[in-house]
Amino acid sequence: MNEIKCTIIQDVLPLYIDEVVSQDTKEMVDEHLRHCHICQQEYDSMKQNLYLPVEKPSPLFNTISKKFRKKKVVISIVSVLVTAIILTGAFSYVFHYKTVIPYSESLIKIETHDDNQLVSRYFGESYAGFNGTHPLPLEIDGEKKNVSFIYYTKTIADSPTRKLINNENSLNEQEYTFNLPESEKIDAVYYVDFDVEKIAREDSWDSLLKRAVLIWEK
Ligand SMILES: [Zn+2]
């Protein structure tokens, strides 16, 4: 197979990360990244800068903006359409656009309960989601450890439906607990945002570990 120059790969990396490249280009970059450590590193650092660890806005909004970027169309649309897009975007942003809650010792605590269960508790005002992994065997400082990664997300505002659900159940949000797998099977819990699909594709739990915060250890 022809060796593609690293400079060419790195030129298209921003587009690749934005997922606006053709299938052929995507495969070419995939293939190159599998074998080229330098470009892989470049990709990792670029992705951390470009990649927002949040859910995408609504598919409609996303599709439209992708098309514009792809065709490099100079945007000149009637104001009605623009307004509609902005409203859709703003709505998505406020209620669905999740951002990762930065870790803070006073906000998020891991507790061990009597039944040998690990529980993650959140002490903030509200959050939109909890994400956690099953314990993964990773090598840390030469030792094999079972590690779980977790993070919480929030939206700018609670969606009306979420409010309704909460009221119905009259839940006290500060008391939400999440059971993590049995503590005896976990050696450490790290706080970091992650995207399981991306990690599975690129096999980079280890690189994730580098930017994760250790919040609990056996
Ligand atoms: Zn390369």
Image (cartoon, helix red, strand yellow):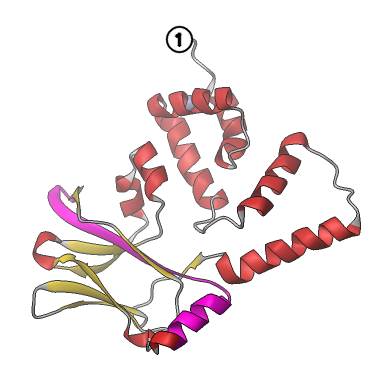
Q: Quick check: is 153 in the magenta stretch?
A: yes
Q: Residue at x 52, y 57 (%)?
A: 55
Q: Position of residue 74 (x, y in %)?
A: 85, 43
Of 54 and 208, the residue lying toward us: 54
Q: Residue at x 53, y 44 (%)?
A: 46
Whether residue 125 can be seen here: no
Say few, some or many: other residues with alpha carbon within 10 Å of mark 1 (under 14 / 14 to 19 / 20 or more): few
Q: Is mark 1 within 8 Å of ligand 1?
A: no
Residue furthest front as drawn: 168
Above or below residue 67? Residue 177 is below
Quarter placement of the C terminus: bottom left
Q: Quick check: is 145 in the magenta stretch?
A: yes
> What residue sits right under mark 1 in the picture?
1
Residue range corresponding to the magenta coloring: 140-167
Q: Position of residue 156 (x, y in %)?
A: 58, 74
Helix, strand or loop for disc 1: loop
Above or below residue 15? Residue 171 is below
Q: Is residue 47 left or right of residue 59?
A: left
Above or below residue 208? Residue 192 is below
Q: Is residue 55 left or right of residue 85?
A: left
Above or below residue 181? Residue 47 is above
Q: Position of residue 217 (x, y in %)?
A: 17, 67
Amino acid of disc 1: Met
Q: Quadrant of residue 35?
A: top left
Q: Position of residue 71 (x, y in %)?
A: 76, 35
Q: Is residue 47 left or right of residue 35?
A: right
Q: Residue at x 57, y 36 (%)?
A: 16
Of 12 and 92, the residue lying toward us: 92
Of 182 and 34, the residue lying toward us: 182
Quarter placement of the N terminus: top left
